[in-house]
Image (spheres, rainbow, N blue to C red):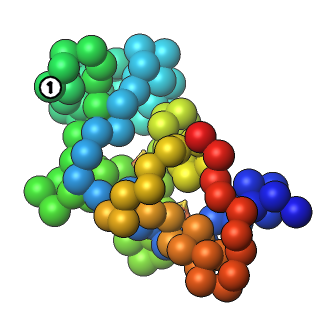
């Protein structure tokens, strides 16, 4: 079986706790604001930042790198039903071989002897 097909998220929350952008489209901003029950302008003003390349918005993060929508105990996303594509695509559609940004489930699969690599 392909690793992608058998992927099962461990819900560890690691991928919500790294510094870095969680890019969102305008449509995703609308969906998140609606989910939160606030105006999209308020959401963008209070919970998003413009990326350095000025090409998109990103969900803001806490000083420690946690996404502002990450909640601990148990680890979870407060906007899970409307989480951005970037989050939905991790790790299957990511192409990072960085040791810093690795999915814990992927690392477990590799340590268990799976030789199948995640595709881009
Ligand atoms: S939006 Fe949700 S899934 Fe995406 S990084 Fe933030 S907490 Fe994690
Ligand atoms: S790092 Fe991997 S296993 Fe952990 S929550 Fe993210 S996708 Fe799931």
Quadrant location of the C terminus in the rendered image:
top right
- Locate residue 88, reporting x and y percent: 58, 43
**Number of numbered labels in the structure image:** 1
Image point 28% across, 23% down: which residue? 57
The front one of 66 and 112 is 112
Q: Is residue 50 left or right of residue 4?
A: left
- Residue 42 visible in this rendered orientation of the protein: no
The front one of 114 and 34 is 114
Residue lying furthest front in this view? 115
Image point 23% across, 53% down: which residue? 19
Query: Disc 1 marks which residue?
Result: 52
Q: Is residue 69 left or right of residue 97?
A: left
> On screen, 71 above or below 47?
below
Callout 1 secondary element? loop
Q: Quadrant of residue 39?
A: top left
The front one of 47 and 86 is 86
- Locate residue 83, reporting x and y percent: 51, 40
> On screen, 95 above or below 53?
below
- Locate residue 113, reporting x and y percent: 69, 82
Q: Is residue 48 left or right of residue 23?
A: left
The front one of 8 and 102 is 102
Q: Quadrant of residue 47?
A: top left
Image point 79% across, 63% down: which residue? 6
Q: Quadrant of residue 116?
A: bottom right
Q: Residues within 10 Å of mark 1 (few under 14, many from 20)?
A: few
């Amino acid at each position: 079986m392909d690793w992608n097909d058998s992927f099962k998220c461990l819900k560890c929350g690691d991928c919500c706790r790294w510094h870095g952008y969680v890019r969102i489209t305008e449509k995703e901003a609308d969906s998140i604001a609606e989910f939160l029950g606030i105006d999209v302008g308020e959401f963008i003003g209070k919970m998003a930042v413009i990326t350095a390349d000025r090409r998109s918005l990103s969900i803001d993060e806490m000083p420690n790198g946690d996404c502002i929508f990450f909640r601990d105990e148990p680890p979870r996303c407060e906007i899970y039903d409307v989480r951005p594509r970037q989050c939905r695509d991790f790790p299957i559609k990511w192409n990072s071989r960085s040791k810093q940004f690795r999915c814990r489930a992927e690392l477990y699969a590799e340590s268990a002897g799976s030789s199948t690599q995640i595709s881009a």
